Image (tube, rainbow, N blue to C red):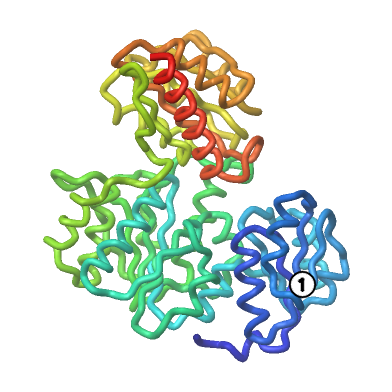
Amino acid sequence: MRNIKYFKDKKVTIVGLARSGVACANLLHGLGACVRVTDIKDNSQTRSTAELLSKDIRFELGKHSEDFIKGADLVVISPGVPLDSQPAIWAKEFAKPIISEIEASAMLCPGRIIAVTGSNGKTTVTTLIGRVLEACAKKVFVCGNIGNPFSGEVGKMREGDFAVVEVSSFQLETIRDFKPKIALIININPNHLDRYNNMREYLDAKKRIFMNQDKDDFLVLNGQDACLSGLEKETAAKVVFFSDEKGLNPNQSAVLKVGELLGLDRPAMLKVFSNFKGLEHRMEDVAEINKVRFINDSKATTADSAIWAINSISSPVILIAGGRHKGIDYRVIIEAARNKVKQVVLIGEAKDKIAACLKGEFPVEPAAGLEDAVNKSYTLAKPGESVLFSPMCSSFDMFKDYEERGRAFKRIVLDLAKRNNSHG
């Protein structure tokens, strides 16, 4: 790793005890930093997570102490922690530098960083870039806002390796020197407007991915996305555009362009695409019960993701949606859904907001929870139709993350399938 001495004997406070917080705390502690962790939540999940910390790391749960920030040389903010939170306010008040976990990891990373951001498709594109690099015999680590945190992988990397990092707008808010060799912005659609005042603020956060790039770096942009038009004038990097190619979807076209920049073999990349069966929680077939297809699309936390899912299904659809509201306008799905969605079943905190947006366009029915929604949808569906779980919302009102939500949906559906099989 690089810059190891930078962290030795530094007093570092990490705000947020999720996967990335634990990984970063253990990494920096192992490099000789004096690490403390603070999390506003005190529940079974945070207590269980705290057990993963190295034994000498001091932590607090259920509160944020001013001393944890005042006594720090550096504050590392986890992605879910807003910059108007109390620890961030104290850090600014005491002139303590604030960085993100990906910033700390990038400082240590000896390999070449490929950073992927956008509103939809980040996880698929990040995964596929990793797959095509592997297929071309490159050593690659796929991490970031997908699976393993960057800080959990960086210690295994060597010079010449590739780090393919999925990066959210939240993580980009607190970068300082983060400088990927290749930065990719797939698309920009309305998202996280519960955190940002408007689309301009959201786009500004995404644009930080290339703020430190220079003429030796590459910025890959979607040439068909109007929101990204003109960004080539705002960067010192070499800008390359991707666009839809015949026989490929936009995600594959983006990956192909990155692969071309790296000199990867095109036939090898196309073979990876043809063998790729998709990701868990993204248009994942769960079961077919009496000719009703159940699809887990829990990863869809935006309306645009739900539109993509609806357009991908040829049969009539019962749509299960809802969760925690992110400030988006759900009416944007109406055109795509009008001739496809026959009923909408709603769950979570946002169900009234979604119902208000869709009322008069589709029959809308509330459900008491996810299990109730699955059972109601099955009752409403006819043979040959599909039940699509594409929430358009974050999961945090009822679940830890979209993965836990997706697993719950699958468990409920499979239990339903067993009951129906036993009755048969």
Q: Furthest-bottom residue in view?
A: 5
Give the residue at mark 1: 36
In the image, what residue occupies the spot 49% across and 76% down? 154
User: Looking at the image, is 58 positioned above or below residue 116?
Assistant: below
Rendering coords of residue 376 (x, y %): 51, 14
Q: Quadrant of the C terminus?
A: top left
Which three-letter amino acid code belongs to the residue tagged 1? Arg
In front: 178, or 367?
A: 367
Q: How many marks?
A: 1
Rendering coords of residue 334 (x, y %): 42, 20
Residue 52 appears in which quarter of the rendering?
A: bottom right
Rendering coords of residue 124 (x, y %): 36, 51
In the image, what residue occupies the spot 55% across and 87% down? 3
User: Looking at the image, is 408 positioned above or below residue 219?
Assistant: above
Rendering coords of residue 385 (x, y %): 33, 17
Question: Is 122 on the left or on the right of 65, as rendered?
Answer: left
In the image, what residue occupies the spot 23% across and 49% down? 243
In the image, what residue occupies the spot 65% across and 28% down? 349
User: Looking at the image, is 220 positioned above or below residue 13?
Assistant: above
In the structure shown, which secondary structural element does the residue marked by tag 1 occupy?
A: strand
Residue 323 appears in which quarter of the rendering?
A: top right
Question: Is 288 on the left or on the right of 204, as rendered?
Answer: left
In front: 312, or 91?
A: 312
Binning the other alpha carbons within 10 Å of mark 1 as few (below 14), some (14 to 19) or many (20 upward) gives many
Question: Is 416 on the left or on the right of 12, as rendered?
Answer: left
